[in-house]
């Protein structure tokens, strides 16, 4: 339980740090501008087995079995062109 609380506190601090925008200098529209955002997203999983039985996994269960997770957005802009990458990786395991 202490691990989950520590992980939640760490993720919250990272989220707050990422939400703070710091710009050293203003760039013109013809220069490349880059943004990166790290975030946390909680969800519940609802699905059906191949036999048709419903399965629901709540966020607390997912957090208990979470080995690693990374979520980030990368954005590059220049003039009227823009590229965006939204990456989510999650590694879950259970011994059932």
Image (cartoon, rainbow, N blue to C red):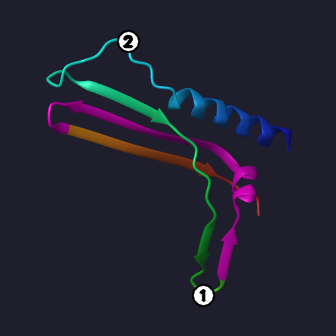
Which residue is at a point 51% across and 32% down the rendered structure image?
Answer: 19
- Label ID, residue 80: none
Instruction: Using residue 42 as the reference point, say whether residue 77 is left or right of it.
Output: left
Residue 67 is one of the magenta-drawn residues: yes
Which residue is at a point 61% across and 72% down the rendered structure image?
Answer: 46
Q: Which residue is under mark 1?
A: 52
Considering every residue shown, the one lying at the far right of the view is 1
Q: Which residue is under mark 2?
A: 24
Give the magenta-colored segment's residue range.
54-81
- Answer few, some or many: residues within 10 Å of disc 1's Cα (few below 14, many 20 plus, some between 14 and 19): few
Instruction: Using residue 37 as the reference point, say whether residue 55 is left or right of it.
Output: right
Depth check: 58 or 69 in front? 58
SS under mark 1: loop
Instruction: Using residue 92 as the reference point, say whether residue 60 is left or right of it.
Output: right
As displayed, is residue 78 above or below residue 51? above
Expressed as whole percent of the image width and height from the top left, the position of residue 44 reads: 64, 63
Alpha carbon distance from label 1 to label 2: 56 Å
Residue 74 is one of the magenta-drawn residues: yes
Considering every residue shown, the one lying at the far top of the view is 24
């Amino acid at each position: 339980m202490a691990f989950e609380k520590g992980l939640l506190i760490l993720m919250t601090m990272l989220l707050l740090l990422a939400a703070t925008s710091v710009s050293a200098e203003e760039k013109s529209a013809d220069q490349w501008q880059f943004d990166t955002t790290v975030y946390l997203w909680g969800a519940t999983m609802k699905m059906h087995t191949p036999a048709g039985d419903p399965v629901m996994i709540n966020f607390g269960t997912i957090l208990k079995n979470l080995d690693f997770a990374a979520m980030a957005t990368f954005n590059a802009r220049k003039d009227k062109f823009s590229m965006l990458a939204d990456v989510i990786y999650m590694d879950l395991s259970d011994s059932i």
